[in-house]
Amino acid sequence: MAGDKVIHVTDAGFDAEVLKSDKPVLVDFWAAWCGPCRAIAPVIDELANEYDGKAKITKINVDENPVTPGKFNIRAIPTMIIFKGGAVVDQITGAVGKATIQSALNKAIG
């Protein structure tokens, strides 16, 4: 489903992969049954290729990893959170256009 540059994170690996990253990280909170999540999956794959080396693009399945979505108050999916230096710097909810996500990522990269 996801491209080879998209990193799949779990509750167990979230801190190491996302919060301790030296690059900005986009986390896509998704589920297999979520139509809008599937609709933006190709965009997430494209971003992973475009931002390779500049930012990490990750996905976390909310059904398989319920702890992390709870920590970040995820109430709707898809929700994308951008982290920088272990802190939330932006949040996007819903199946938005690629330009919206790119704009948020570009701000985080600075």
Image (cartoon, rainbow, N blue to C red):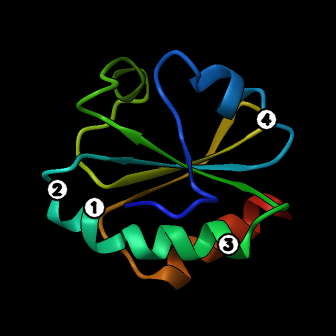
Residue depicted at x 46% and y 20% = 11
Q: CA distance from mark 1 to mark 3?
A: 18 Å
Q: Which residue is mark 3?
A: 49
Quadrant of residue 18 within the rendered picture: top right
Q: Which residue is mark 2?
A: 34
* First along the sequence among labels 2 and 3: 2
Vertical side of 92 occupied by 18: above or below: above
How crowded is the residue under tag 2: few (<14 C-alpha within 10 Å), some, or many (20+)?
few
**Residue 10 on image: x %, y %:** 47, 26
Task: From the top left corner, tell me how far across and down residue 47 is, in percent.
Answer: 61, 72
* Image location (x, y in percent) of residue 88: 62, 39
Residue bearing mark 4: 21
Q: Pointers 1 and 2 in contact (CB under 8 A)?
A: yes
Q: Is residue 103 left or right of residue 52?
A: left
Mark 2–mark 3 Cα distance, whole angstroms, equals: 23 Å
Res 52 label:
none
